[in-house]
Amino acid sequence: MGCATSKNADSKASRTARWRSTGIVGLRDSKLKTFPAEVLDLDRSIRTIDLTNNKIVEIPMDISKLVNLQKLILAHNLIDRLPINLAKLESLKVMTFDGNRVTTLPDELGQLVRLEQLSISGNSLESLPATIGSLRNLKLLNVSKNKLKSLPESIGSCFSLEELQADDNSIDELPESVCNLIHVKSFCLDNNNVKKIPTNLLKDCKALQNISLHGNPISMDQFQQMEGFQEFEARRKKKFDKQIHSNVMISSKGLDEGIDL
């Protein structure tokens, strides 16, 4: 009995030492029900945490101790809310909460000014906080498979945004401010209720190469009549041709042609 206890202690100490040395905590598929407390004691050492596919219910407020954390991945758990103390993780660049039970995002989210990727698909969000517009370095926003009826006007202030994934919601229209997203390359809005998109979207979003609106009431005629359609079409075809010439692997959905209405 004593030997078993000793070995377990050694194993735990060895694991903690490895985390401290590498800065990476990887505990996918570990049947965890709580956030591992020993991780919080490593404060400045940890840069990446991946706790995907566990049964964690909540994130402790003390997570704010991990001041050098850059990647926080908690996909497929049982989390229903995010603590406001997440905002103190000023080094955070990637945050993933896909497949949880989150219903709202705290306003303090906007304080994560270094955040580049935010993925929170497959939750129960009904809205996004206006403070999301403070995420000026955000490049990827994935809010697919939620209960969103709209996107905040402030999203147009996410000037670095390159990809917006918002499939499978109940969004009626895009705010006019999305025309400010001059770096955006892809809008994915399949299976919503979009009837129209901002008039100047194709004209102002000069980097846009792909827009997917399958399963929406908007018509192809409406889209083709928009100013900037010809230029968008040229970019779309150029991307498509590049995929072919680069021998891109063809998925079950076929090649990405850059438009789907």
Image (cartoon, rainbow, N blue to C red):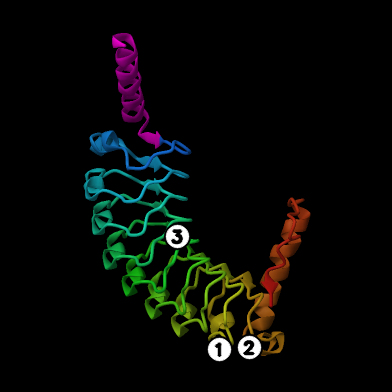
Q: Please, what is the three-letter code of the amino acid marked with disc 1?
A: Thr
Say which of marks 1 and 3 sits in front.
3
Neighbor class of circle 2 (other Cα within 10 Å; few <14, some 14-19, many 20+) is some
Secondary structure, magenta segment, majority class:
helix
Q: Residue 128 carries which label?
A: none
From the image, which quarter does the C terminus lie in?
A: bottom right
Q: Residue 120 carries which label?
A: 3
Q: Please, what is the three-letter code of the amino acid marked with disc 2?
A: Met
- Which corner quadrant of the image does residue 251 belong to? bottom right
Start-end of magenta stretch = 1-25
Viewed as shown, does residue 3 lie left or right of 211? left
Q: Which mark is residue 199?
A: 1
Query: Residue at position x 31%, y 29% from top?
Result: 20
- Label 1 and label 3: CA atoms lie apart by 29 Å
Instruction: Identify the residue position indicated by label 2 in the image.
Output: 226
Viewed as shown, does residue 70 lie left or right of 207? left
Question: Do the residues under discs 2 and 1 have CB atoms within 8 angstroms?
Answer: yes
Residue sitting at the far top: 3
Mark found first going from the N terminus, 3 or 2: 3
**Above or below: residue 190 compared with residue 90:** below
